[in-house]
Image (cartoon, grey):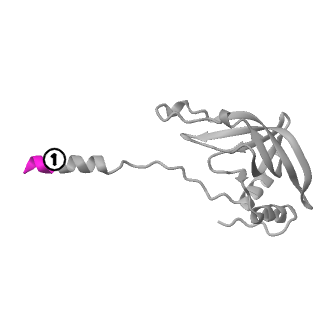
Amino acid sequence: MRPIRNAILLALSVAVPGPALALSCLAPDVARTYLQLDEAEERYVAVHGVLTFDASKLPKTDMQDQASTPDSTPLPAQLTGQSLSAEGFTTPFDKPITLDVRCFGPWCAGAASGAEILGFVELRDSGPVLTLDPCSSTSFPEPDEAMLNTAVHCMQGGACKPER
């Protein structure tokens, strides 16, 4: 009887997955991001536009050697669109920027070149930088009209309340 019990236990131990690791992020929220960055010492501008870059240079996680995944990968990019002013997304923005692509452990930010984005671009002395991280903290791919309206309301001093 014991060999059967051991076989069942062995089968169960193989069939039941081990603990799953997951990245825990707050849901992306334009109002929360706006408020956080408005309080930051650094200067930011919200830009709605098209982001282009060499996507083949995005960091990739080596699942066999996750420690080798870089925390940050700078990539040259171009952001073309409109930056946010008190009147809305009305100020032309067509500049080379640096993408600061972040990885949190094995989770790396992704982006699609040629895609529409709402990004909060940091204005550094060395040039504009858009940080992309796995939690979409400062960038919102394919923003909908509600996201853009939220950014405008925040800029105009109107309702700027995070959803969660």
Q: Does 107 lie within the magenta span?
A: no
User: At 62% across and 47% down in the image, what residue appears?
Assistant: 134
Q: Give the range drawn in magenta.
A: 1-5
User: At 68% across and 39% down in the image, what residue appears?
Assistant: 101
The answer to whether residue 21 is seen in the rendering is yes
- Name the side, left or right, on which 127 lies relative to 6: right
User: Farthest front residue?
Assistant: 114
Q: Does 3 lie within the magenta span?
A: yes
As helix, strand or loop, the secondary structure at mark 1 comes to: helix
- The image quadrant that residue 31 belongs to is bottom right
- Name the side, left or right, on which 10 lies relative to 160: left
Residue 109 point in image, percent of width and height: 63, 44
* Of residues 156 and 101, the one drawn nearer to the viewer in this rendering: 101
Total marks shown come to: 1
Residue 112 point in image, percent of width and height: 69, 45
Which part of the image, by quadrant, shows the C terminus? bottom right
* Of residues 48 and 123, the one drawn nearer to the viewer in this rendering: 48
Residue 18 point in image, percent of width and height: 36, 48
Residue 47 lies, with reference to residue 52, above or below; the image says: below
Residue 49 point in image, percent of width and height: 81, 50
User: Farthest left residue?
Assistant: 1
Q: Residues within 10 Å of mark 1 (few under 14, many from 20)?
A: few
User: At 86% across and 40% down in the image, what residue appears?
Assistant: 95
| Residue pointed to by mark 1 | 6
- Name the side, left or right, on which 2 lies relative to 54: left
- Check disc 1 and give the amino acid type: Asn
* Of residues 80 and 66, the one drawn nearer to the viewer in this rendering: 80
Magenta: main secondary structure equals: helix
- Name the side, left or right, on which 42 lies relative to 102: right
The answer to whether residue 41 is seen in the rendering is no
User: At 75% across and 51% down in the image, what residue appears?
Assistant: 117
